[in-house]
Image (spheres, grey):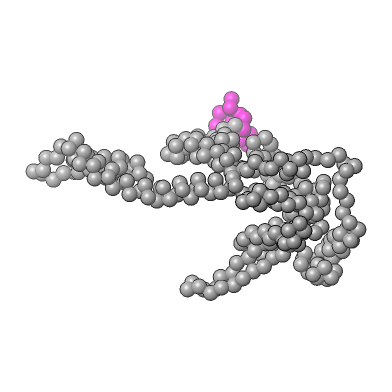
Amino acid sequence: MMISTAFIAPVLISIWLCTFQPPGIDRDFLDTVTGFLQVFATGSLLLLIPLGAYAYGMFSGVFKAAKTYPVRFNRQRREVCYVDSKTHRVLIVPWESVVAWVSNTQGVTSYGATRQYTFGMGLEDEEQDKVQFILLPQPSDAHALGMWTSIRNYMEDGQLVDVPNPMLKALGLIPTGDRLKPYEGLHTFEIEREDARAMGSLDEGGDELTPEQREHYGYSKKSYWPLRRWYMWRVLSFWKMPYMLAEWAHRKGRPTLPEQVQTWSQPLPPEQWAKPSAALVKANQLVKTAMDKKGATFVEACKATGLL
């Protein structure tokens, strides 16, 4: 917007004025565009305010993330690790002592009633005789329960690794390599270019066939326009710069874990894996039975089995 306002708009306006000027008025293009450039370039400096606010928000979010440690769940040890972002104190608690809940609050604004949902976990710190609360805002109670279910599935049943999207699997498109990376970065540039070529059916074979033969044998019609549009948008958005920023944000926004946590995160031989207690195994079985055989939801199953 700054470049367009400062340079492109003055040139276009000057061209229009000099081309369609009325009789009796003789405008010099260079004088006209110079005058407009001075006005528009000075005015475009005002765009530095929203641009600076956006950059500040983006970079401050990255640096804030670099200071915030993620909560780590170790299935082999059956423990949960929390690192305080200010004191860097490490708190490790048994998985079966973790307390979780979903809360919602309702308020009234000038636009109507609003409701906020929160997924919370409590980690008991016996050394300091307190509970460390972890609160995560969620869009709905379904999202909050879904987060808790994913954590439970990981800790109780094991992690599902590289499970493809059912739609992609039906089409035979199994993601591999860079497509499995859970973040955007420089690799995303090449993935999007491949997708643009695929949209135009440029890599599906049949290059030696004529258009009539391609149609006869069931090949899609080739089109370079998806790829051309992709290249045009990349030029307008400064080529690889957004991807470089995303790569930098991903690497910078990952804090270095304390040595104690890195040691704790190392894999254990199977014979040293912690086992769930008999009470937890029984509770999980009761809930699964209620959900599978009676069609109850997770909350209803917990209530029916006396766990809530």
Q: Nearer the viewer, residue 112 or 277?
A: 277
Asked whether the viewer can see residue 99, the reply is yes
Looking at the rendered image, the quarter that the C terminus falls into is bottom right
Task: Tell me residue 65's x, y (percent).
Answer: 58, 48
Position of the N terminus by quadrant = top left
Residue visible at 69% across and 47% down? 165
Quadrant housing residue 202: top right
Residue 11 appears at what percent x and percent y?
Answer: 26, 40
| Residue interval drawn in magenta | 204-219
Residue that appears at 25% across and 41% down: 37
Q: Residue at x 27, y 45 (%)?
A: 42
Q: Is residue 19 visible?
A: no
Residue situated furthest top in the rendering:
208
Specify whether residue 106 is painted magenta. Answer: no
In magenta stretch: residue 205? yes
Percent x, y of residue 277: 89, 56
**Residue at the extreme front:** 128
Q: Quadrant of residue 169?
A: top right
Q: Main secondary structure of the magenta part?
A: loop
